[in-house]
Image: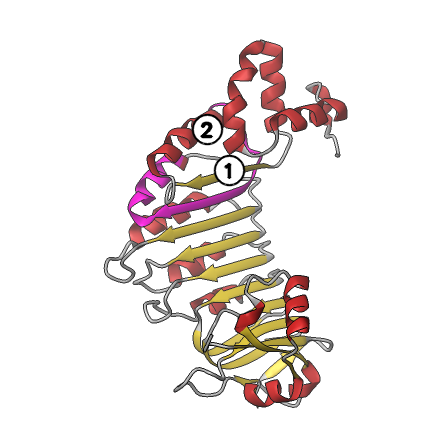
Amino acid sequence: MNITPQQLVLGMDELLLAIYGFVIGTNMNTIAEKIQMRLVSSRFNTCFITYLNSVPLELNYNTRHEGNEAIAQILPLIQFMKKYEITALFELRINVLCIDLHELRDNFAGFEFSNLGVLELVITTQNPGRISYSNRVLSVLSLFSEASSVTNLNLFDNTISRPFAMYEDFLSCFPGLKLLDVNFGNPVKAADPDGATRASEKCLQLEHLVCHNIFGDFLLHSESLKVLDLSSCMCLTSIRLDCASLEEAWCQNHIIIPDIGDLIIGGVSSIALAQEFGNSDKAFIHEYLEKVNYHIESSKIESISIIPSDAIRNSDDFHVGKDCRIILFTYNYLL
């Protein structure tokens, strides 16, 4: 662990930091149970606060599943961090119902997010598309307008009944974004479903993009992207890429779904690619899914195709890295 001069001045050497780390940890939700121990002495309180400003902290704000009990625990934590100007929050995971957005905004108003690196924002409604919550969502997004240090961003919002421009502006707050995972619920309900790709093109350092429920034609230009995951998008009709640094692209073949045309990857049929490169050996499928930590039962996969980019390199619609691989999953939807 690297010790800053400020930590040394305040008496937090490596050994003391290690002891505090063992006793207190970095998860603010569990630290809440230990926060009273700082009252043992003024010296201990000073060290306690110094420690919290010296390590990357995590906070889980989940009121969707835990309701009022979660608020009763989290709100004092947020107030405590504001009071003592604790700005070391590195990872924040938010999971709320749309009706609680105002409360979320009020609780975090004035909070300092200057060191935030990982942000997960899950906003859910039980009736997507029936009511617009754009003003509420905007008020929450504005909380992070100065959180330029965010590198990992996970977004889920099925309340969409509006243009994507608000999220496009939101992404512009994170110039150093490396990973973006975006899901806007049911594609039939989503307005501007390919807006995520248009917005991601403005993230000039983005290396890993995961899109869910995108449908129709997928077109993306990026000079920095290394990994593209479209494996949960079952309604794509074509994939066209201009990504010179891309090393791996994941997608799925909807060969078994009736009434949906063949997926075209850079002008080449996914059916043809699966026939040429597909491996349906169950042991291989199981081992591969474990190797890449892909969360789906191997029994649901008909075959996995590992396709070299050379197989479609002659297409004008597919410009990727020289050694890029296309991982094509063919699902068995009949199971």
User: Is residue 64 positioned above or below 106 on the image?
Assistant: below
As rendered, which of 189 and 260 lies closer to the eye? 260
The image quarter in which residue 42 lies: top right
Q: Secondary structure at mark 2?
A: helix
Q: Residues within 10 Å of mark 1 (few under 14, many from 20)?
A: many
Please state which amino acid type lies under the numbered disc 1.
Leu
Q: Earlier in the sequence, mark 1 or mark 2?
A: 1
**Secondary structure under the numbered disc 1 in the rendered image:** strand
Discs 1, 2 touching: Cβ within 8 Å: yes
Q: Is residue 307 left or right of residue 66?
A: right
Instruction: Determine if residue 109 is in view.
Output: no
Residue sitting at 58 percent across and 15 percent down? 45
**Badge number at residue 77:** 2
Compute the Cα span from label 1 to label 2: 9 Å
Q: Which mark is residue 59?
A: 1
Would residue 173 be visible to someone looking at this image?
Answer: yes
Q: Is residue 202 left or right of residue 95?
A: right
Residue 25 rendering spot, x and y as whole percentages: 61, 30
Rendered position, 277 above or below 36: below
Image position, residue 99 (x, y; %): 28, 46
- The span picked out in magenta is 82-107
Name the mark on residue 249: none
The picture places residue 14, in percent across and down from the top left corner, at 75, 26
Image: 164 above or below 50: below
Is-magenta flag for residue 327? no
Q: Quadrant of residue 69?
A: top left
* Residue type pointed to by label 2: Leu
Q: Quadrant of the N terminus?
A: top right
Query: Residue drawn 35% across and 46% down?
Result: 139
The residue most toward the top is: 41
